[in-house]
Amino acid sequence: MQAGQPFDTVIVGGGSAGSVLAARLSEDPARQVLLVEAGPDHGTRLPAELADITVSSHPLHDWGDEVRLPGGRTQPYPRGRVLGGSSAVNGGIAVRAMPADFDAWRFDEWRWEAVLSCFRRLESDPDGEDQWHGRDGPLPIARTPEAELNPVHAVFYGACQSTGHRYIADHNAPNSFGAGPLPRNRRGLQRVSAADAYLTPDVRSRPNLEVRGNCLALALCWSGNRVIGVSTVVDGQLETIPAGEVIVAAGVVQTPMLLWRSGIGPASELAGLGVPVVVDRPGVGANFSDHPAIYLFAAPKPQMVSPGDVTIQTLLRFTSSTGPANDLQLFPVGAIDLSANSRRQAEAGGLDTVFAFNAALQRVEIRGSVRPVSTDPVDPPVITYPFLAHRPDLERLAEAFELGLELLSSPSYREVANGPIFLPERLDREDLLAHVFANHVAFYHGAGTCAMGPVDDPAAVVGPRGQVWGTQGLRVCDASIMPETPRANTNLNVIAVAERMAELI
């Protein structure tokens, strides 16, 4: 490019969506594409904690956000601040949403039949039927064979079957349910982020693609309601990047924050921050959904877990007594180290290492929010996480916790475990609900803060092609445009959304 010329497309955020968009859009050699990421770009020389899929997050690569849970608790809410975004720091779980999750978006462009081809295109999955899976996509998908399962996972299928849950070989076949191997985006124990998969050396060598790390977007630049660039800061220096079009792919938290700083959001609240209103869209930062989760800890018998174990290998998807299909997940988490917590060690009878079941609610009925406290991007937002304050949601998650207790009492788990730990002495129904409420955690699967919907819906922010209603030249593409969190871990689905958006743009 010649100096001073705008890029055709500037993508803000190099995470699960931004990496895909940069790779796919730059396949057109006539389109000049710039990808900017607030965190560092390590290229192929990943730090050990990013390469190792057994490490789920790291403070060096995080935004430092917190969520406010019901009952006055707070909890860290890790979001990756590095090229690859949260796909560079997560557990690599690669589970597809239910087909009905996409059909519920209410746009023909996003019906399951259209998105399925994107799932097939993104993956290299050696398992399952050809009609559902791709074999030569950029993202490798791997499952652990039964012969290689660690003891607390090896008994999981039998225990689930004894409680009425069937074995399922492929969790990514449409509408699958039951207990089966957990698909993950990995090569061996190496995490494969969206950046690793899509921004390969060959892709980066394209003359029409530039990737800039450590480039923080401050605000969008406007001419009326048309975006003409992005104001950024690099090494303390301000730089305005001219653009023909901007796609914001900064994630469920940072995308609404950037829009607020740029004058898109609830008009009255923007005025309170001193931000000139460009577009009054009250849905920006609202409609936040996620998967609340609860851990059921268990004491293993000797030699059943060890610190070097792979922590997650198997998964059960099932349905509560009152919810929609597959509104619950349960999976064992092996090798939880207690050595740094003497109180927990004592409560566990002196054990250094335990395991747990993670139970997660996949569909919540109420919504939280993401709100700024100032226009300074350094100031973390206020993230409200109210989900288990809604008793029906609490009761459904408690069903998954109860199933975990039932599994631990099964003959299969009695071979490897001495039963649950860290529970109150009494555990009748109300005690159990109180325990789940007091100890539930965020599962880091946020969505919905810039939801897709019709232009006349005040809660909607974007249309079916990611265009931000009321603006020109501005799109959003990441988990924030999902009207609600799908009934699956979000990362693989965000990659598919970006694949589909690249087709539609």
Image (spheres, grey):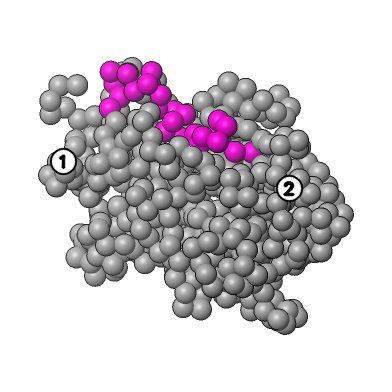
Q: Which mark is residue 240?
A: 1
Across and down, in percent, residue 239 comes to 14, 41
Residue type at the position of mark 1: Thr
Q: CA distance from mark 2 to mark 1?
A: 55 Å
Q: Residue at x 75, y 65 (%)?
A: 419
Secondary structure of the residue carrying tag 1 is strand
Residue 55 appears in view: yes
Q: Pick whichever of labels 2 and 1 is earlier in the sequence.
A: 2
**In which quarter of the view is residue 99 placed?**
top right
Across and down, in percent, residue 341 comes to 51, 67
**Magenta residues (range):** 183-210
Position of 213 relative to 333 (above/below): above
The quarter in which the C terminus is drawn is: top left
Q: Is residue 274 magenta?
A: no
Across and down, in percent, residue 403 comes to 76, 63
**Is 98 or 269 nearer to us in this picture?**
98
**In which quarter of the view is residue 204 placed?**
top left
Q: Which residue is mark 2?
A: 151
Graded by Cα atoms within 10 Å as few (under 14), some (14 to 19) or many (20 or more), the crowding at tag 1 reads some
